[in-house]
Image (cartoon, helix red, strand yellow):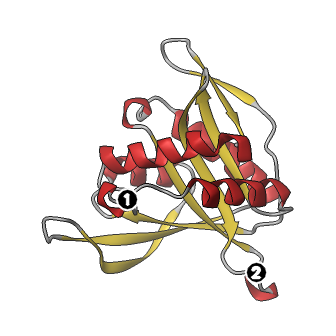
Amino acid sequence: MIIKGQIYKLPDCREVTIKSAGPEDAMKVKLLREATARESHFMAREPEDGPMNLEVIREGLASFAESEKNFMVNAYLDDELVGDLGVSVVRPHIKFLHRGYLGMSIRQEYTGMGVGSFMMKVALEQAKKNGFEQVELGVYSDNARARHMYTKMGFKEYGKNPRAFKLKDGTYIDEIIMVNFIE
């Protein structure tokens, strides 16, 4: 599913275009995800996991573009990709088609400017149009900023996966499981 472009104005009046990435944007997605892995421990990947496979990313973007249900919402500042958000069916079986799983990343320098909230608003509207009845996500228990934004956008905490993440220093962080029942 391709998301049509929308404009979001940053507090300094620069414009961010919110739209879907296509296979031609695979390198930008690769660079964004590798950068966010370096900037914060809140991502699933560590830089030491190695470079992401460009062809796998390209194929994934093509799959999103062709899907009637799954989609991505990406944030571009000029030609730079500064954030991405994907929603996919939890499992491709009839009993699960009402559930979407959301993953999101934003470059650190663009957090706290409303980009994530705007991307989430666009994504939740699209999820409803695509027939999702609920959107689920997991978030690091120590990511207060993200948890606040998710709560503001209608997500509720319903569970915890203890010690879900083990950091390089040997400490563990719980994963908070959240859901938004789309009205």
Residue at left offset 72%, top offset 47%: 23
Q: Give the mark nearer the N terminus: 1 vs 2.
A: 1
Q: Is residue 102 visible?
A: yes
- For badge 2, the amino acid type reads Pro
Residue 126 to residue 140: above or below: above
Asked if the residues shown at circle 1 and circle 2 are in contact, with their CB atoms under 8 angstroms apart, the answer is: no
Secondary element type, mark 1: loop
Q: Residue at x 85, y 58 (%)?
A: 66
Return the residue nearer the eye: 4 or 33.
Answer: 33
Nearest to the observer: residue 126 or residue 92 = 92
Q: Is residue 173 above or below residue 45?
A: below
Where does the C terminus fall, quadrant-wise? bottom right
> Which residue has dot 1 on it?
50
Query: Horizontally, is 127 left or right of 39 in the view?
Result: right
Disc 2 element: loop
Q: Amino acid at mark 1?
A: Gly
Q: Residue at x 51, y 32 (%)?
A: 114
Q: Which label number is shown at residue 90? A: none
Residue bearing the label numbered 2: 92
Instruction: Compute the Cα span from label 1 to label 2.
Output: 29 Å
Q: Residue furthest top?
A: 13
- Asked if residue 181 is positioned above or below residue 108 in the image, the reply reads below
Apparent side of residue 169 relative to residue 162 in the rendered image (left or right): left
On the image, the x and y values in percent for residue 90 come to 66, 76
| Quadrant in which residue 35 is drawn | top left
| Residue 179 image point, x, y percent | 56, 68
Q: Position of residue 120 (x, y in %)?
A: 61, 46
